[in-house]
Image (spheres, rainbow, N blue to C red):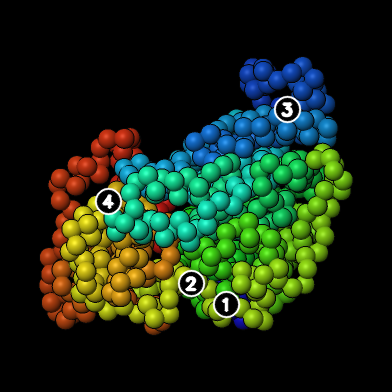
Amino acid sequence: MTAALAEVTHRITERSAATRTAYLARIARMAQRRPGPERMGCANVAHAFAALPGSDKLRVVAEKGPHIAVVTAYNDMLSAHQPYEAFPALIRDEARRQGATVQVAGGVPAMCDGVTQGLPGMELSLFSRDTIAMGTAIALTHDVFDAALLLGVCDKIVPGLLIGALHFGHLPCVFVPAGPMSTGLSNDAKSRVRERFAQGQVGREALLEAESAAYHGAGTCTFYGTANSNQMLLEAMGLHVPGSAFVHPHAALREGLTREAVRTVLGLTAKQRYLPIGRLVDERVIVNAMVALLATGGSTNHLIHWVAVARAAGILIDWSDFSDLSHATPLLARVYPNGSADVNQFQAAGGPGYVIRELLDAGLMHGDVATVAAGGLADYGREPRLADAGAAAPLHWQPLPAASGDDSIVRPVAAPFSDHGGLALLTGNLGRAVIKTSAVPDDRHVIEAPALVFETQDALLAAFKAGALERDFVAVVRFQGPHANGMPELHKLTPPLAVLQGRGFRVALVTDGRMSGASGKVPAAIHVSPEALAGGALARVRDGDTIRLDAVAGTLDALVPAAEWVARTPATLSPAQAEINGHDLGRELFAGLRRNVKSAEEGAITWM
């Protein structure tokens, strides 16, 4: 184990001692109870199993066979979740083969950020995570289950399911992914069309044709954004059947992996190798997830989500922990937006298994952790194969090749793309922020330029279209934090800023909002905390202030004399914009979450 890994893990463990101990005590109390059908009243039991076939009722009530909950994020709006339509029948079939029963305990909402990007619906996106967590709790609170299978892939869905499951930490749980869509139009080609559209060089018809060629079928989008970062992190945490992240939804192996998930979760129940999710997800497992994110240049959204996930297990982490691990973690993967490859090419070059094996061998991850696979984390450095042509046949795992399948996509620890991870912490008189550096050209890691202040992303886009941004500047887009409007992603700002950067201007973005997991080559200091509406320093910035974003030194400052800075009256959100932020398209229903939400660095948690 490297010194940095040991030191960060130790301080997280020390910091979390009281909350983690209390959490584990609650799990132990819940685990000591008799199974649901034995301790519940007869009417409760009758209601719970009224719709089960007679043979299943006999198995779960009289024979006391294991009973599995399925919590699904299925809908056919999300390409990534459409394949889940057929999963419950498959899971039931495999469970019956194993002498168990299954009920779909509940469904949780799942929204697509690609659909809502730049639109009012995006303001519900971050809060959908905690809504999903609550939906997971509602599903599991029927409390008749011995284990749970969690069906979800995309941005807020996996963190939400995980937070909800950790609040039922006495249950063994396995995540069941659906896989990525096949490769379509390359991400680089898609980005070029977006930039040409932003400049008025092509019309809407050409843009729609390009977007439809990129997003064209069932499965996750193929760039390495938040959804696919989720899958990398679940592999690194040992919560998947090993190697299941990036297998196509319609491959025979996908069915085999889904059946294996049923067998795996049954092997974790009280009569087998009892391993509840709340014990599995310990401080070392959280650190492993952080390292995997950094080693692959994953989504900045996880500097919010995994703080919340950890807190759900009684573990306290912050951005300084990410930053210190980033300095000690080599960048081993280049997948769009950090490179040109998509996740299918990443998988073909070695994928999560190659990265995990390299990190383990170098002492950069904790290998002595529990996983849903009986062999531990080392199993996640192998690749699954069907024993024969039948999807219901048992699986076996074989070693990955020693060398990368393509060293322009995946590299060993001995020859990384960079000796540090792709994310950095920025601090200064503007607050604390994060930046994804892995896709930003080296000559853009330091930007010093006058501020142009915007209250909305639409105002910046309008300025671009009007030709008012043809210069060096730092765009300060404030009042985009969780208190203000739910902290939407501002990914629609990427094409115009990239165009300006391509014209030779030195530009950057500073915001208390988020960027997409696919944010790329323009330097962006995001998640600035405290946010402007909660007393943050962004409210003091004025047009023309010199802003220095220095990803090398890790600083973010307004170069304004200290006395003047302190004396300034902070700007306030305009009444007209506050009215917009609070109404229409369901935003009224989330007013309580906006009032009570914690800061981005505290995970934007709404349940504490």
Q: Position of residue 214 (x, y in %)?
A: 51, 50
Residue type for callout 2: Ser
Q: Position of residue 513 (x, y in %)?
A: 33, 57
Tell me the residue that label 4 is attached to.
Answer: 484
Mark 3 element type: helix
Compute the Cα span from label 3 to label 1. Answer: 56 Å
Tell which tag, 2 or 3, sits nearer the viewer.
2
Q: Is residue 532 left or right of residue 73?
A: left
The mark nearer the N terminus, 2 or 3, is 3
Q: In the picture shown, does residue 307 fall above or below 608?
A: below
Instruction: Rate crowding at label 3 as few (under 14), some (14 to 19) or many (20 or more) other CA atoms within 10 Å.
Output: some
Tell me the residue that label 2 is attached to.
Answer: 438
Tell which tag, 3 or 1, sits nearer the viewer.
1
Compute the Cα span from label 2 to label 3. Answer: 54 Å
Compute the Cα span from label 2 to label 1. Answer: 9 Å
Query: Considering depth in this image, is 517 or 374 the residue closer to the camera?
Result: 517
In percent of the image, x 77 and y 16: which residue is there? 54
Tell which tag, 4 or 1, sits nearer the viewer.
1
Tell me the residue that label 1 is attached to.
Answer: 417
Tell me the residue that label 3 is attached to.
Answer: 38
Residue type for callout 3: Glu
The mark nearer the N terminus, 2 or 1, is 1
